[in-house]
Amino acid sequence: MKAPRIASTGLVLALAATVLVTGVVVAGAHGGGPKREVIHTCVDDATGAIQIVRGHDTCDAGWSPLDWNGKGPKGPQGPPGEPGEPGVKKVEVVSASTMGLLGRSPIQATLGIGVDCPGDAIATGGGGRTAGSRNGTNLPGSGAPPLVATYPLEKNSLHDEAEPGDVATGWFAEASSLGPNAPGGFEQGQAVTVFAVCADDGQAPPDEDD
């Protein structure tokens, strides 16, 4: 839809007079550089058409400069919005570690550990890391056992995975075993560390049945 044109030069002059009252100067040429708070235009004296120009431009013959404020007066304050959700009062990271020493006897295939958020905090994230050692010497990064599982824990559990829709209150991490000892009496060990990002909004977590 085309913008309406100003029908007469008299209306343009009336608008220019109004702008002068508000303190914006109308002159033969626009003064100064472009400013966000001022809109610079040229008005066709015959048709009333308006063309936006740069602040330092000069209007052509038959056109009159017209500037006005780019920002109007402040309007009335709107109605208050709806109350927002309670914010988080405290966020902290908690962790726990476990270590297994692998002897000559058969060992379990994995080593895992869970950590619970303190108080009424819920787990918003988490993860884990692993480390390995041989004869008390830490193994390089490639020698550490890989993580095979990491997941949020359901409420009041240190090993059961939270189902969709459950409230997670902890985190679990599990690593694969380094395998049996190599011959020669070497002792191999591995460690798993789990951490949980816990957020507390000052309210008790809802029951799972809610």
Image: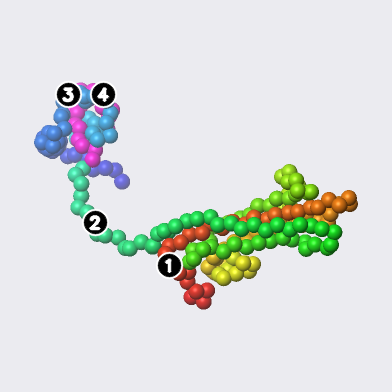
Q: Nearer the viewer, mark 1 or mark 3?
A: 1
Q: Quadrant of residue 85?
A: bottom left
Q: Report the magenta stretch's main SS.
A: loop
Q: Nearer the viewer, mark 3 or mark 4?
A: 4
Place of residue 208 in the rendered image (x, y in percent of width and height, measured from the top left): 52, 74
Give whichever of discs 4 and 1 has the lower sequence position. 4
Where are the magenta residues, as a range?
A: 52-71
Q: Within the magenta stretch, is there residue 200?
A: no
Q: Are marks 3 and 4 in contact (CB under 8 Å)?
A: no
Which residue is identified by label 4? 56
Residue type of the residue flagged with mark 2: Gly
Q: Is residue 99 left or right of residue 44?
A: right
Q: Which residue is mark 3?
A: 28
Instruction: Single out the mark in the foreground, 4 or 2.
Output: 2
Q: Nearer the viewer, residue 209 or 177?
A: 177
Tag of residue 73? none
Task: Identify the secondary structure beneath mark 1.
Answer: loop
Q: Tag 4: Cα neighbours inside 10 Å, few (<14), some, or many (≥20)?
A: few
